[in-house]
């Protein structure tokens, strides 16, 4: 599994509305959105990661997106649905580990003041345990 993102840096990085492309893949199938709000996607994925352990299925609205993200537990893993695409993650722990790695690299591009101006960036920072660290 991979969660990759690319920030649109044309015209500079906007910490309030960080727009870019996101790709979530299981190696065979891919969910991909271009020119989307990356902080909203990370927020939805993090909400899913935090809540899917207590339920079998979960629907999460992605701010600014017309379609919701759906997560469904299967055996030890997880299926992720978005629009007409589905990916399979063999283990829930793999999803959480991959999400933390990708979210960490995303949040590190912003400085502390920028993060504090965007509630979603602050939530992402909390998820990856940066609350106690100085981010410059």
Image: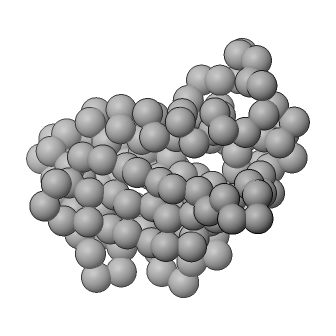
Residue positioned 31% across, 42% down in the render: 95
Asked if residue 61 lies left or right of residue 18, the reply is left
Number of numbered tags placed on the structure image: 0
Compare residues 59 and 25 and report the one nearer the observer. Answer: 25
Compare residues 15 and 87 and report the one nearer the observer. Answer: 15
**Residue 9 position within the rendered picture, expressed as x and y whole percent measured from the top left:** 66, 59
**Residue 102 position within the rendered picture, expressed as x and y whole percent measured from the top left:** 46, 40
**Residue 60 position within the rendered picture, expressed as x and y whole percent measured from the top left:** 49, 65
Based on the displayed image, in which of its 4 quarters is residue 64 positioned? bottom right
Based on the displayed image, in which of its 4 quarters is residue 126 positioned? top right
Note whether residue 22 is visible. Answer: yes
Note whether residue 44 is visible. Answer: no
The type of colouring in the image is one colour
Q: Relative to 74, is 59 above or below?
A: below
Q: Relative to 16, is 129 above or below?
A: above
Residue positioned 54% across, 52% down in the render: 42
Residue positioned 81% across, 31% down in the render: 112
The image quadrant where one finds the C terminus is top right
Compare residues 42 and 109 and report the one nearer the observer. Answer: 109
Compare residues 2 and 97 and report the one nearer the observer. Answer: 2
Asked if residue 20 lies left or right of residue 123, the reply is left
């Amino acid at each position: 599994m991979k969660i990759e993102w690319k920030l649109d840096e044309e015209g500079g990085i906007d910490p309030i509305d960080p727009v870019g492309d996101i790709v979530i893949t299981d190696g065979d199938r891919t969910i991909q959105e271009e020119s989307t709000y990356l902080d909203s996607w990370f927020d939805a994925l993090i909400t899913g990661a935090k809540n899917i352990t207590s339920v079998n299925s979960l629907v999460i609205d992605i701010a600014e997106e017309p379609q919701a993200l759906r997560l469904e537990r299967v055996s030890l893993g997880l299926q992720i649905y978005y629009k007409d695409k589905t990916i399979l993650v063999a283990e829930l722990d793999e999803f959480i580990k991959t999400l933390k790695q990708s979210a960490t690299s995303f949040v590190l591009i912003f400085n502390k003041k920028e993060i504090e101006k965007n509630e979603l960036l602050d939530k992402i920072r909390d998820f990856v345990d940066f609350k106690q660290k100085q981010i410059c």
